[in-house]
Amino acid sequence: MKIVETKTDKFVLGGHEFNSRFILGSGKYSLDLIEAAVENAGAQIITLALRRANEGNTNILDYIPKGVTLLPNTSGARTAEEAVRIARLSREVGCGDFVKVEVIRDTKYLLPDNYETIKATEILAKEGFIVMPYMYPDLNAARDLVSAGAACVMPLGAPIGSNKGICTKDFIQILIDELDVPVIVDAGIGCPSQACQAMEMGAAAVMANTAIATAGNIPMMAQAFKKAIEAGREAYLAGLGRVIEKGSAASSPLTGFLKEKEEA
Amino acid sequence: MTIYVNGKKEEMPKDTTMEQCIEKLGYEKKKIAVELNEEILPKSQYESRILSEYDTLEIVTFVGGG
């Protein structure tokens, strides 16, 4: 049997190659822990938000290890136009061409507005951005995002910051099965087993922030996620064993029991 | 002259360039982006761009986020 070489299993996104399939968020925890979290996570992509600057303050950019790809998000945007504005400003800071587009009008559940997200994606992809849209897992919207030039789609597992897991499992599976771009499960993943589950389903990568930020030991949880994501990826590449809906299938031989009498 | 930076009033000498303004306010050029009157001003133009009375600046940077 052929053993899949996981070392050669690269995650390709917008023409860039990554070894890690863990996209780490940087929100809601101390800047002092960012370096340790990134290192323990083995993450090569870290998300950031754009906000008004305060003069003289310490800057998160001083805490992110060199060589890590910065993925600014468009948080705060309520319309496509606002998302485009934030993306352009982020690029002007000098972070590269990646952008995680999120357009959110709903403040209670923080659910993404797929329609505005598609509009922003189209504009930004034309401007040369590598657009990673955060979305509600809807196949039609996902196809429109791909047509608009998205480099991947980032469907939510559950509301942002909820740690509830992949409540949208069946719909994310449809995206994985039907789309030709990477599907990155974003939002809602609350523990390593859920990250592993996403990877077993065939997700290309997992994004997590709150699960790490609200953990008792942030660097250790980052490492636990890393292991879970790698395990899930290997399981996916290996091909999961089948499930039988009813009855059982013995794992041990059904012959040669001690009680058996030899036939005369 | 008066300018507005991130919604706050600031006083600057006449003929201040964007480069001088940013330095005076204590920002690090390589970690920020600036919108001048709602249009992004490329960093390459900071030195040559002279500010006018009532110019409105948005100075942004990265913070932690998911």
Image (cartoon, coloured by chain):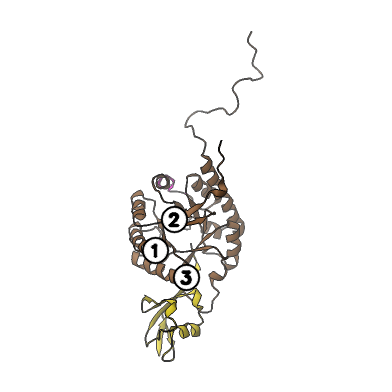
Chain colours: A brown, B yellow
Between B37 and A246, the one lying in front of the other is: B37
- In the rendered image, which residue does mark 1 sit on? A128
Indicate the quadrant where residue A252 lies.
top right
The magenta-colored residue range is A166-171
- In the rendered image, which residue does mark 2 sit on? A159
Residue located at (55% from left, 45% from top): A234
Q: Distance between the residues labelled 2 and 1?
A: 30 Å
Q: Is residue A114 above or below residue B59?
A: above
Q: Nearer the viewer, mark 2 or mark 3?
A: 3
Which residue type does callout 3 highlight?
A: Gly
B41 inside magenta stretch: no
Q: Distance between the residues labelled 2 and 3?
A: 30 Å
Secondary structure beneath disc 2?
loop
Label 2 crowd bin: few (<14), some (14–19), many (20+), radius 10 Å: many
Q: Is residue A77 above or below residue A144?
A: below
Q: Is residue B42 above or below residue A248?
A: below
Chain to which mark 1 belongs: A
Measured as percent of width and height from the top left, residue A235 is found at 54, 43
Which of the marked residues, 2 or 3, is nearer the chain's N terminus?
A: 3
Residue under disc 2 on the same chain as residue under disc 1: yes
Residue located at (44% from left, 72% from top): A92
Indicate the quadrant where residue B56 lies.
bottom left
Q: How far apart are marks 3 and 1 (CA)?
A: 14 Å
Residue located at (41% from left, 56% from top): A151
- In the rendered image, which residue does mark 3 sit on? A94
Secondary structure beneath disc 3?
loop
**Number of on-image labels:** 3
